[in-house]
Image: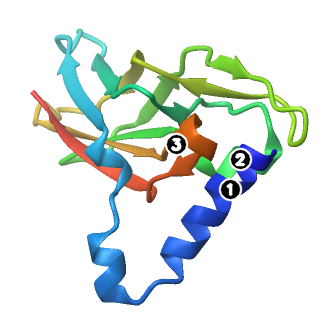
Amino acid sequence: MIRTGIALLAVAAVAALPAAARAQAKKSGSVVKVEATAGKIDDGGKQTVTLTITIDKPWHIYANPVGNEDFASAATVVNVTGEKKPQSVKVKYPEGKVEKDATVGDYKVYEGKVVITAEVERAKGDTGPLKATVKLQACNLEKGGTCLLPETVEVKVP
């Protein structure tokens, strides 16, 4: 709890800074790299998008689901859009690694490299490029814990 409490306090403190100081604060995307690939569109208009997220050590991002309501708003969330709105997007998140915290309770995170897939049912006749966004927050439990500012990372899907 102390580590997590310190991390949450750090994020709140950064958010309270004046705009000029906040602009210099480090964002989560500075320690996370997102790459996207896509399979071919099948005859039914479905396409699989694969997002590979690489997280610098010793950082982690919160899994989806996090498994702890206190961290629900920090869960990693993927969205896929196109020139035309897809009929549906079904995202498959991998199971996260459980972090045990005696004070706030257990929660799940992603570390290192994680692969998230999305099954996209394209709008009729849509073969244009897609865009994926990944909402995430990076935290580090070393040295008392710290979190970077949350960020939504946008990538083009080739």
Left/right placement of residue 145 relative to residue 48 reads right
Callout 2 amino acid? Thr
Q: How is the image coloured?
A: rainbow
- Looking at the picture, how far across and down is residue 61, in whole percent? 50, 35
Q: Residue at x 33, y 25 (%)?
A: 53
Q: Secondary structure at mark 3?
A: strand
Nearest to N terminus: mark 2 or mark 3: 2
Distance Cα–Cα, label 1 vs label 3: 11 Å
User: Do residues under tags 1 and 2 come within 8 Å of each other at their CB atoms?
Assistant: yes
Check disc 1 and report the residue beneath it: 6
Distance Cα–Cα, label 2 vs label 3: 9 Å
Callout 3 amino acid? Cys
Check disc 2 and report the residue beneath it: 4
Check disc 3 and report the residue beneath it: 139
Callout 1 amino acid? Ile
Nearest to N terminus: mark 1 or mark 3: 1
Q: Residue at x 10, y 36 (%)?
A: 128
Asked if residue 63 can be seen in this view, the reply is yes
Vertical arrangement, residue 51 with respect to residue 131, above or below? above
Vertical arrangement, residue 107 with respect to residue 21, above or below? above
Within the image, what quadrant is residue 25 found in? bottom left
- Looking at the picture, how far across and down is residue 89, in whole percent? 44, 31
> Which quadrant: the N terminus?
top right
The mark closer to the camera, 1 or 3, is: 1
> Counting other residues with Cα less than 10 Å from the Cα at mark 2, is it few (<14), some (14-19), or many (20 or more)?
many
Number of marks in the rendered image: 3
User: Which is more toward the observer, 63 or 126?
Assistant: 63
